[in-house]
Amino acid sequence: MDRRTLTESFIMDSDEDWMKRERGKARDLRGSQWWNRQCAKGICHYCRRPTPAKELTMDHIVPMSRGGRTTKGNVVPCCKECNTNKKQLLPIEWEQYLDEI
């Protein structure tokens, strides 16, 4: 099974109100002191490359489309490239993807 088929088979149909609430939580969390400290480290969670704090994006380790919540334990700072490449993959799928490239 290719990566795209595997990923699409696990995507949830999320309730629109739930998604709206989770996006609101993400906005609030991005404005928090905790998030600022995470970004101040200047390291992408996935590739470990130094990245200016202002260029780090918030990524849900378990994507919201796959049931992930916006909590401190499920969000990490990462570079735009990793965030774009990870898409809606779970951590184990992301590791398999990295092993393939």
Image (cartoon, rainbow, N blue to C red):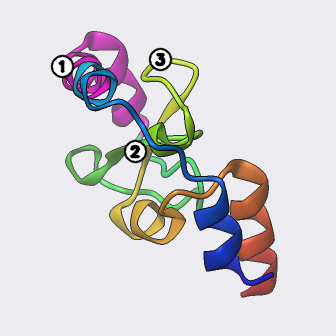
Give me the disc on residue 50. Answer: none
Inter-mark Cα distance, 1 to 2? 17 Å
Mark 3 Cα-neighbour bin, 10 Å: few <14, some 14–19, many ≥20: few
- Label located before the other in sequence (2 or 3): 2
The residue lying toward the viewer, choosing from 100 and 79, is: 100
In the picture shown, does residue 90 fall above or below 85? Answer: above
- Magenta span: predominant SS is helix
Residue drawn 47% across the image and 63% down it: 87
Crowding at mark 1 (Cα within 10 Å: few <14, some 14-19, many 20+): few
Q: Which residue is mark 2?
A: 42
Of the numbered discs 1 and 2, the one sitting upstream in the chain is: 1
Left or right of 83 in this view: 56: left
Residue depth check, mark 1 versus mark 2: number of the one nearer the observer: 1
Closer to the observer: label 3 or label 1? 3
Disc 3 vs disc 1: Cβ atoms closer than 8 Å? no
SS class, disc 3 = loop
Name the image quarter holding the N terminus.
bottom right
Tell me the kind of residue under disc 1. Answer: Gly
Determine the residue positioned at 49% across, 36% down.
Answer: 76
| Residue receiving disc 3 | 71
Which residues are drawn in magenta?
A: 22-41
Q: Quadrant of the C terminus?
A: bottom right
Write down the quadrant of residue 96 in the picture.
bottom right
- Label 1: which residue? 31
- 86 and 40: which one is in front? 86
Residue appearing at x 59%, y 55% in the figure? 46
Q: Secondary structure at mark 2?
A: loop
Q: Tell me the CA gap for discs 2 and 3.
A: 20 Å
User: In the rendered structure, which disc, 3 or 1, sits on the residue that comes first in sequence?
Assistant: 1
Near-viewer residue (82 or 14): 14
